[in-house]
Amino acid sequence: MSDSTQVVSFKLGPEEYGVDIAQVQEINRMVTVTNVPRAPAFMEGVINLRGQLIPIIDLRTRFGMPRAEHTKNTRIVVTEVGTKRVGMVVDSVSEVLRLPLDAIEPAPDMISGVDTEYIRGVGKMNDRLIILLDLAKVVTNSERRELEAADVESAA
Amino acid sequence: MAGGEFFDRTEFVQYFRDETEELLQSIDADLLRLEGYVDAKNPDPEIVNSLFRALHTIKGSAGMLDFAAVQQIAHKLENVFDLLRKDRMPLTEGGINLLFEGRDVLTALVRAAIDGGEAPDDAKDFVERLDAFAGVYDETAQAIEGPRDGLDDEESLEPIDDLAVAAFQADVERMLAAAQAAQPAQPAPAIDAGDAQAAVDAFLSLSPVASVPAEAAVQPAPRAWQAERPTSAAAAHDPKRVAAKSQTIRVDIERLDLLLNLVGELVINRTRISDIAATLGRELNAGPDRGTASLAKDLSESSALLARTTNEIQESIMKVRMVPIGQVFDRFPRTVRDLAKARNKEIRLEICGADTDLDKTIVDEVGEPLMHLLRNCIDHGIEAPAVRETRGKPRHGTIRLNAYHEGNQVILEISDDGAGIDLQRVRDKAIRLGLIGEADRLSDREIIELIFTPGFSTSDQVTDVSGRGVGMDVVKKNILRLKGVFDVDSRQGEGTTFTMKMPLTLAIIQALMVRVADELYSIPLDAVIESQRIDAGELRTVHGGEVITLRGQVVPLIRVGEFFRLDAPRDPDKVMIVIVGLQGRQVGLVVDSFQGEQEIVIKPLSDVIGRIPGISGATILGNGSISLIIDVHSLVASAYGGNGRVTRAEFSGV
């Protein structure tokens, strides 16, 4: 038991990602997202989740991938990172996987599209590669970028 | 002066007003029902009893407050219902008309008693007619029963005896303790789930407001007035309990409903947790490792949910705790009147924004500093009438009390048109006290700051109004303790303005809803002066910026859609403008359309999003959609590239 980990896997384009199941609160179909003006580009907006405002990150934009049209498979993965709740728009959610720890390798130096600092490791399962995300970094760095963006703006 | 006792009385009067208003309404409803029994043999005893009890309660409360006229009428009416319920008087049409009239007279007397006005003229006439009417039956009753023992009259018309006061005090203390247990003074950062449940249970079952109707319905007619005190006791005060504060608040039923729904969720989850825990225990006993992992997961998920619901309950309770600042302001007109008289000054008090909601804790705590500032205005600010005349001012001074929401803050202002702070005198005094040296050069602002030094008072004589000992330093300290900001602005000869900015984590505000590029935005109504729809042809540009001329004043415009970089094409014909006020200046916000006013709950945007210029938070609308709240200050500041202040140059440039 202790030698494996459970992850929720989802897809962005051809690539498969995974986040620790303990950090996933729920998975929702796409809903109306209220745009927050002058927020960073990857900040899709906010949604009303049963009376709570949840910020939504477009994970594709976050990772520098081209935006994609929302389809019936598009999902919002609501995650809980520390005290923060953040929803992430993904192309589709695949499944919940149990990954043996010895099947996880440290992040290679280069992975197409994604900055390696968000990556906790890469899980191998049969012939699949699952990129395991470090959500704390995904969220924290978005704040830093946002601040940088604001600085640039005020300097302009 | 006996400030504390005075407070208690006014709070009690307020409670009396609320309570009596409800009772008068129930009397009306009961009389209407009773009317159906005219000339019938047996009027429903429940109705008569209910009327009797209502009048009895009014009589008791009026007695506590020495409202003799109210007490008298209530007593006489109560007497009639006593005759009715003892079947000594038939219910006639003339009788019921007289009772309706009595209810109106009682209402008028209650109002007169509370507002300190004159009793209506027809009250006396009514008493005579009522006496004549009831006297007939009363005499019959007496002939049968013998003279009424004096107890009833004594109980109602004499000052309350010590025993009753002691009983009442015990009730008050019990209710206060219960209320305290149910409503933590400070919302705890994290609530233990068990505690929360207990607190909510206690709150729902013990809240006097919630329990009044039920009690009224099932309680047999109480004979001694003490027996029904608990319904009104929580807000009432024994005069000796000087420092005690009102522990009941009246709340919107909708807010309580929300609370109840959340509690429902809490209970469901709690049950689920106990089930899981029980199963987990069985599993573990049956053998190690069998499904324990997934059960443990279930348990942790459920407890996470429980924690969230608990948080929401906390938030709801916060909402329940929002009360209008008017509860504090209501005390002041009388105080100002009395103090002005004592100081031989003529003072008019203007109150604005009494319906501004803020947290009960703040309302409770802010009363004293406000009172102190008011006294300061009366004592040091407003000049004597003769002095004012020589200075070319109206004989009567004006003190303005103002409250409004600004972003996530509540602003409280007290201003007077008095003499202002005498900077020279403050300086001299500071030198005498050794606070500053003779040669020190201080700005006006720095001199004003000196009045916040402990023990500092510029008044030459100690009066019973401002007193001594408690100075401006204490006021400032109290405001800072509430995490507020305190500021003084004074102009010699023109007056002084004290400004307090109180924080508000959760505020309900009125907002003007506007549409910009298909999104609905909320503009806090406090900031809004007016909305205008003008022809595009009236637009002018100055230094490349758009302006309009409004009643001779040039008002710069900001196009909200363009500021927010939204796809908002300009309307070639007409322009919708929301004029907002900002530090005494006006700015026009151009929007696509106005969508009416609405009450909204401010929710902060997640810090994951960070600070967005021009947005202070968001609110969830009735249909579940989200509206962002425009922060007028930061929007204007950001649009002009400033740091929160719109500089004079930007405006005078036009």
Image: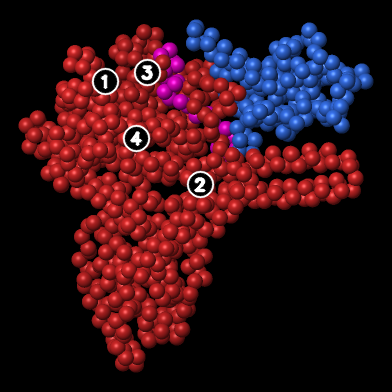
Chain colours: A blue, B red
Q: Which mark is residue B184?
A: 2
Kind of residue sitting beneath label 1: Arg
The residue singled out by tag 1 in the image is B445
Residue, far right: A126
In front: mark 2 or mark 4?
2
Local crowd at mark 1 within 10 Å, few (<14), some, or many (≥20)? Answer: few
Along the horizontal axis of the image, is B341 left or right of B588?
left
Can I make out residue B562 in this image? yes
Q: Residue B198's spot in the image, x, y percent?
A: 60, 52
Q: Secondary structure at mark 2?
A: loop
Q: Which subunit holds the residue at mark 1? A: B
Kind of residue sitting beneath label 2: Pro
Same chain for labels 1 and 3? Say yes or no: yes
Q: Quadrant of residue B538?
A: top left
The residue singled out by tag 4 in the image is B412
Q: Earlier in the sequence, mark 2 or mark 3?
A: 2
Q: Residue B192's spot in the image, x, y percent?
A: 62, 44
Task: Answer above or below: position of B298 versus B8.
Answer: above
Tell me what residue is drawn at x 37 percent, y 11 percent: B541
The residue singled out by tag 3 in the image is B645
Q: Secondary structure at mark 3?
A: loop
Residues under numbered marks 1 and 2 in contact, where contact means CB atoms less than 8 Å apart: no
Q: Which subunit holds the residue at mark 3? A: B
In front: mark 1 or mark 3?
1
Q: CA distance from mark 1 to mark 3?
A: 18 Å
Q: Which mark is residue A116?
A: none
Tell me what residue is drawn at x 27 percent, y 77 percent: B130
Span of residues in magenta? B621-642
Q: Earlier in the sequence, mark 1 or mark 4?
A: 4
Kind of residue sitting beneath label 4: Leu
Task: Answer above or below: position of B461 versus B605.
Answer: below
